[in-house]
Every structure is written in C-alpha cells, then in structure tokens.
Amino acid sequence: MADQSLLTDEIRALVGQATESREAIVSEEAVRRAVGVYGGEVPSLEEGGIVPGFVLTGLMPEGDNIRIPNLLPKSVLVSNEFAIERPLVLGERLMARSRIADISERLGGQFGHGLYVRSEQEFRGLNGEIVGRTASTLMHYDPAGAEERR
Amino acid sequence: MTIDLATLKEGDEIPVSEMTPGAEHVRNYFGNSKTAPPFFFSEEAAKAQGMPGMLVPGPLKVGILYGAVERWLGDAGYVRAIRAAHRRPDVQGRTIQIGGTVARVYEEDGKRRADLELFIVNQDGQPSVRGFGTVEFWDR
C-alpha cells in the first residue's frame, strides 16, 4: 500500500513562518570566533575593513532562530550553507531574521519516507538589500519506516 | 598561496589539507550559546545518544570547507558561498582531509567567478561531506 502524504495542510502552513528582524553587528568578537572555527588567520581589524564572509554564520542573535517542531520522531542534518552578495565589513550593522523557507516530502532512500525542512537566516543591509543568507536542511523521519526498507 | 588567474581552469585542484577538529573549534563555533547540545561537549552525553563520540557540528564543517577555500584563494578574491551536504558524521579528535577541484570559471555581473566542488574525507577514506563553493576574484 502506498504511504500517505506526510505533507498535511498544518505542516504546509509552517512554510513562511519567520522571526522578527533583529540587529546583527559584524563585530571583532564575531570575526575572532569565526576564524577560530576553521583555524584561519585573524585579518587586520580596522573599522570598515573586509572580514571573512563565514562571520555571517555566527551573527544570528542567540535564541532568534526559528523553532522547527518535531514533525516526526527523528531528524538528521542534511546540509548547511552560507552565501554573501558582497564582502562583509567590520562594524557594519545588518538586520537578521530566520524563517522556514520550504518543506518538501521525499520517498525512498536510507531513511524511507521523510520531510525535508529548510530554514534560512536572512541578513539585510541598511537599505533593505540582501547581504547574505545562511541555511540548513533537516530531514525528519520515522525510524520504524526506515527499518522496513532495510 | 597565489592563484594564477590567467591560467586558472576547470579541473584545477585545490590542494588536499588535513585538520583535526576538536573541542576548541567547537567552542568557537558555539561561542556563548546557552542552547548548545551537551553531546558536542561530553563523551558521556554523546554515547547516551548512541553516537560514536562527540561529533563535529554540521555547520562547523561549512567553516572547515571555507577555511580550505580561503587558504587556496589567498588575496585573489573572496568566498561568496559554501554548501556542505552531509554524508556521515565526523568525530572530534579524528583527522579529516579537505580538498576539491575547480568546476567552472566564468564571468557574471561583470565579475570573474569560479565554482568549486569540495570534499571532506574521514580517516577511513570515506566521504563525510560533499561540498560546493563559489569564489569571486578581485578586479586587478
């Protein structure tokens, strides 16, 4: 018997949910932390100087990420990404918000029938222009369904 | 490292480098977060979750790819994008290899850019991340 769709109206309604925009500052501390993550060299920290774009991944204020409900008993991280439209500079102030960008359904594979939830953190400049984005995709699945496929 | 932009082409390799992600990298990643899951910091908590050890957080692996690309790029430009598709977990304290190739060199919006295919391979030679990147070169 074919599986029933997991993508109910209630779950579809989560797409687009977003947090309020909050200020995120490209600070010296954020730069030092980012460089410490990948073991690079801390650049010259002059106000207005270009800093590594990876800084973006640590700018979302604590607790401001969108809460994703547990749609199925288990979840696994599928992917992470970041992208910037232009170099970031030290001291600039961005506006950040987090949102559920997409939910899709997938059949088959190691985990069986699952739901892919993509959440995005969007960073905008003073004029509202997109400066960069970070995103992650979580796959929610039921281990019972995955076992049946093994 | 200095890239020769005049000869850069599809298939050029990003040299393989090694790294052993550990507690310090993880602490930097989480910063002062109060919501960081304990299984990234405690062997016991990780085992209780059925994990083989304290894992390397997925987003941190974006940083590891970023670092490899930045070292290869030097002062020739900046990293515009990195994506990591996770294949299997990496455990803190185990050495990984990072590398890649140039997939495409092109002009877009009046800028010279390159797309990269990237990878992280674990100690057993198994791919743990398939990655993608885009860099933009400074106008000279």
Image (tube, coloured by chain):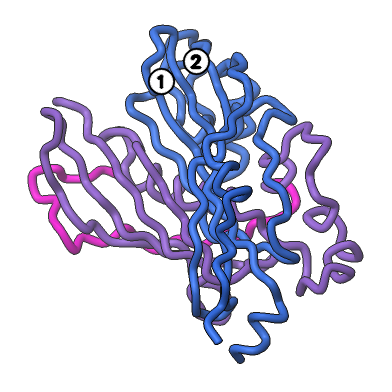
Which one of the lettered chains is coloured blue? Answer: A
Marking on residue A90? 2
Please tell me which residue is depicted at 41% across the width and 47% down the height of the picture.
Answer: B82
Locate residue A28, reporting x and y percent: 60, 19
Residue B139 appears anywhere in the view? yes
Q: Residues within 10 Å of mark 2 (few under 14, many from 20)?
A: many
Please tell me which residue is depicted at 54% across the width and 53% down the height of the picture.
Answer: A137
- Where residue B4 sits, quadrant-wise, is top left
Q: Which residue is mark 1?
A: A50
Q: Amino acid at mark 2?
A: Leu
Which one of the lettered chains is coloured purple? Answer: B
- Report how far apart the C-alphas of labels 1 and 2 lie in the structure: 6 Å
Q: Secondary structure at mark 1?
A: strand
Instruction: Tell me: residue A98, above or below residue A100.
Output: above
The reply to whether discs 1 and 2 touch (Cβ–Cβ < 8 Å) is yes
Marking on residue B112? none
State yes or no: residue A15 in magenta.
Answer: no
